[in-house]
Image: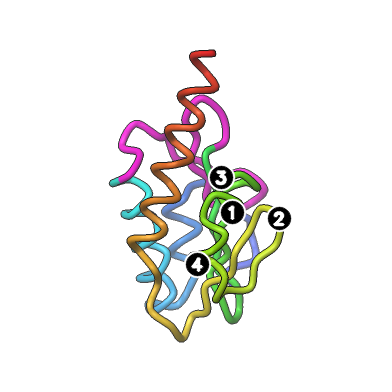
Amino acid sequence: MRSTKAPATTVDEYIAGFTPPVQDLLEQVRAAVKAAAPKAEECINYQIPTFTLQGNLLHYAAYKNHIGFYPTPSGIKAFQQELAGYKSAKGSVQFPLNEPLPLDLITRIALFRAEENLKDASA
């Protein structure tokens, strides 16, 4: 959980509100998404870090025991088999804090979502 009470207004503020080990995990997710979608913009939506590219791309957040990753229902469905080992729901997946992040998978999901948003925007 965030160590500060006021909602963050920037992604940097959001990340700074956590302990260094959690900050590192959040920065890893951030870097993976930036690598996959370099034209995506960062903001805070729903009080958590968000990437946008022709609309919402994905969100991510830190919690007591996991990193929440929210690539929309289509992002979860497209990678359902690879996400089978993680707790997930229609549009979200939980990556436990005590396990290495699946950065390759996060990158591929972000790339999928970027391509999906760009395709939808051009249609």
Q: Are marks 2 and 1 in contact (CB under 8 Å)?
A: yes
Q: Residue at x 33, y 45 (%)?
A: 34
Disc 4 packing (10 Å; few <14; some 14–19; many ≥20): some
The secondary structure type at the circle numbered 4 is loop
Image side of residue 92 versus residue 121, left or right: right
Task: Look at mark 2 in the image and give the residue it sits on.
Answer: 90
Task: Look at mark 1 in the image and give the residue it sits on.
Answer: 76
In primary-sequence order, the first of circles 4 and 2 is: 4
Identify whether 65 is placed above or below 47.
Answer: below
Identify whether 54 is placed above or below 23.
Answer: above
Residue type marked 3: Ile
Q: Position of residue 53 (x, y in %)?
A: 47, 30
Q: Residue at x 52, y 18 (%)?
A: 121
Disc 3 packing (10 Å; few <14; some 14–19; many ≥20): some
Task: Look at mark 3 in the image and give the residue it sits on.
Answer: 44
Of circles 3 and 4, the one toward us is: 3
Residue type marked 4: Gly
In primary-sequence order, the first of circles 4 and 1 is: 4
- Residues at marks 4 and 1, CA–CA distance in whole angstroms: 28 Å
Figure quadrant of residue 123: top right
- Residues at marks 3 and 2, CA–CA distance in whole angstroms: 21 Å
Q: Which segment did they paint magenta?
A: 36-56
Image side of residue 87 versus residue 119, left or right: right
Q: Residue at x 49, y 80 (%)?
A: 97
Task: Look at mark 4 in the image and give the residue it sits on.
Answer: 17
In primary-sequence order, the first of circles 3 and 4 is: 4
In primary-sequence order, the first of circles 2 and 1 is: 1
- The residue furthest top is 123
